[in-house]
Image (tube, helix red, strand yellow):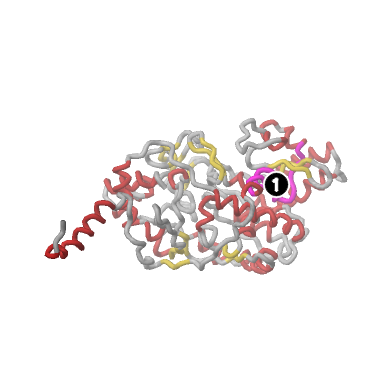
Amino acid sequence: MFTKRYFYLLPILALLLYSFDKDEWAEPNDPEIPVGTSVLPTNIQNTEGDPAKGWDFLRYGNFIGGGIPLSIYSSFKRNLSDENLLQREGPSAQLPPGFNAYTNEAGVQIASGLTCFACHSGKVKGQYIPGLGNNTLDFTKNSSALFNLVAMGIRNKYGKKSEEWKAFEPFMRGGKATAPYIVMPFRGINPAFALEQASVAHRQAANLSWNNGETTFDIPQTAIGSDVPPLWLAKKKYALYYNGMGRGDFTKLLMQVSVVAVEDTSTARQMNGNFKDVMAWLQNLEAPKFPGAIDAPLAAKGRRVYAQNCQACHGRYGEEPSYPNLLVELKKVGTDSAYANYFMENIAFSNWYNQSWYAQSSPRSEAKPSRGYVAPPLDGVWATAPYLHNGSVPDLETLLDSKLRPKFWKRSFDDQDYDLNKLGWKYSMENKANDKETYNTTLQGYGNGGHTYGDLLDVEERKALLEYLKRL
């Protein structure tokens, strides 16, 4: 029992008890905002929709505005799949995740794509993960000839005055208009913004109607692709896209693929009504759990490394999670600047967007490019290789030690070839870019430099950090 003469020991005892009783995963308070970064404006989204309806809309809905008659699409057997990865019923069950089957108002069954899950779902070690960025797609060829082939099949079977042709025509029109501008230098990178830019250049901003044969601005001949971010990060963000240019209402931003074939603002408005449910689904979407064993003591050490070196930009995990929503200046992060600079130097797209229905009608959104990149949350980071905004680094081990980064590297694009120790794709180092499946970091926009913060760690610290990142 304490007597009065031992009261002076109580504060010391309390500190000792606090230290020993504290969870081994405890972190220090969030560090101050790092130099060279700025906090994005607070932008809370409306998530009061129905997540089940959002899930169904993504799997079955028409948010493209047109497509290929299902009878024509299904006649090419390689277009079909018996995996039913999205657990769908009816005609959609036989389609890959990138296409939805629906019946339009004229009663024509349509295969519509590419849908959200074409780019935002994929496999790792046999596990299909809705929301994962798809880094296996191949945009290295101009697809105009494919649209011509499908058009010939529809004309021969149904004729140009048929409802089938009417359903296909806007999809073909938008696809052929964009096809020359979305060709990428190698497989695995995504031309989403190039597609959108080429599409909107053919549309009136106010009502989204198509300009036949004319463009509202000159389309840049060379666009820069990017890696595809996972959808489960959206609920933490104040801005979308790598450069943080997607501001305001996310429902408008998420539906922009519809600019390929949407008729006008009346149909766009109908589509947008469903995206409040999509936002609710995104709110419930969680990152996948690491499928292997995790060394708990090593991960505990890695957590401390993370807290000291990564947390300030990428956010705090644990019982009191937080995410700072930081935009990092190009000179600070040092990664390839071409993507961010592209949108600052080609402002016609942003100008169009900010004058369009997307920005001028409620709920409003905005395109606001910057010379910087958003430091993303790291939920599920173990599954999201390749890394950096341009997908130039094949695994996390290599990201954390920049001297290991290959100039030319090649992978099999087989989802089983994923290294659960290095956290990324197994690859071979090449002497040069011999084919379209070799990543070439010497090309503008695809450099693998920058983000060298891991170089400051020693070998054991990097090993511990990798183990901790498996838990996120």
State the residue in front, 409 or 276.
276
Instruction: Write the start and end of the magenta stretch as one range.
Output: 54-70
* Residue denoted by label 1: 61
Query: In which quadrant is the N terminus drawn?
Result: bottom left
**76 with respect to 287 (left or right):** right
* Residue 55 in magenta stretch: yes
For residue 209, side relative to residue 281 (left or right): right
Residue 34 coordinates in the image, percent (x, y): 37, 65
337 or 102, nearer to the observer = 102
Is there any visible trace of residue 87 in the rendered image? Answer: yes
Count of numbered circles in the view: 1
Q: Where is 45 relative to 458, above or below?
A: below
Q: Position of residue 189 (x, y in %)?
A: 54, 48
Amino acid under disc 1: Gly
Is 30 contained in the magenta span? no
Mark 1 lies on a secondary structure that is: loop
Q: Write down the quadrant of residue 157 in the picture.
A: top right
316 vs 373, nearest the viewer: 316
Please name the residue shown 80% across and 40% down the image. Answer: 154
Query: What's the residue at 66%, 37% (across, down)?
Result: 88
Q: Is residue 186 visible?
A: no
Give left or right: position of 64 versus 463. Answer: right
Q: Residue at x 34, y 53 (%)?
A: 306
